[in-house]
Amino acid sequence: MSPRQKTTFTYEHTVLGFLMETPLHAYALHQTVVDSPLGNIWHIKQSAFYAIIARMQEVGFICAIETEDDGRGKRLLVCTPAGQAIYARWCSSPVAHPRDMRIEFLAKLYFCSLHGPEAIAALYDQQTLRCQHWLDEIIIDPADDQYRTAVLQYRRGQIQATMSWMEACRRELRFPTLAPTMEDL
């Protein structure tokens, strides 16, 4: 992940999210990710995970502090202020594309659930607005060929299904809302 602003999901955001909770050794961090609910959507080998950690140290998003553990020197990974800032921006903003809902939104939802109901509500409200924007951008022209029409109808259906799923989760899991819903008006 480069130091300049990056808006797409990377596994680095997930690493930062876990390190925001508590500093961990690399092996314990990998196990925490694998054993967490995110282990259902993110599968990564330990060697690839360590490569991510190395890259994040290179750009200054995490640092390692030498510790003594059972008489052996170990490196405790800590999120730096730069890492904290990029994580906070990522976690509080909606995903940019419908395809990002499957992994990135679920990761954001997990971390927002750790930050409290207001974080969940803010993410949900922003993501709902973004979904509506995606729908508004889909314009089906009667002059379009059948294939283009089919593709656009598919995209529209996916976004509508996503919005229905989000609303069902909000009701069933009792996620809070900040913005008034149609039921409130």
Image (cartoon, rainbow, N blue to C red):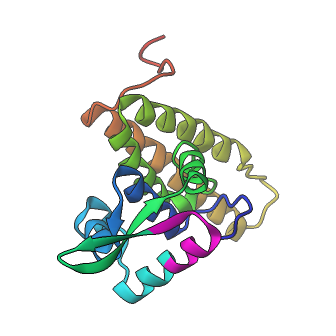
* Residue 115, position as x, y percentages in the image: 38, 38
Give whichever of 178, 22 is nearer the camera.
22
Decide if residue 165 is on the left or right side of residue 151.
left
Give whichever of 167, 73 is nearer the camera.
73
Quadrant of the rendering where the N terminus is positioned:
bottom right
Q: What residue do we see at 50% from left, 38% from top?
A: 123
Q: Is residue 172 above or below residue 56?
A: above
* Residue 147, position as x, y percentages in the image: 68, 70
The number of numbered badges drawn on the structure is: 0
> Does the magenta portion include 63?
yes
Extreme-left residue of the structure = 70
* Residue 109, position as x, y percentages in the image: 40, 47
Residue 134 seen in the figure:
yes
* Residue 72, position as x, y percentages in the image: 25, 81
Give whichever of 132, 90 is nearer the camera.
90
> Does the magenta portion include 23?
no
Extreme-top residue of the structure = 185
Decide if residue 141 is on the left or right side of residue 107.
right
Residue 40 seen in the figure:
no
Q: What residue do we see at 41% from left, 17% from top?
A: 183
Decide if residue 3 is on the left or right side of residue 16.
right
Q: What residue do we see at 44% from left, 34% from top?
A: 119
Extreme-right residue of the structure = 143
Magenta segment: 54-64
Residue 130 image-quadrant placement: top right
Decide if residue 52 is on the left or right side of residue 22.
right
Q: What residue do we see at 52% from left, 79% from top?
A: 54
Residue 132 image-quadrant placement: top right
Q: Is residue 185 above or below residue 125?
A: above
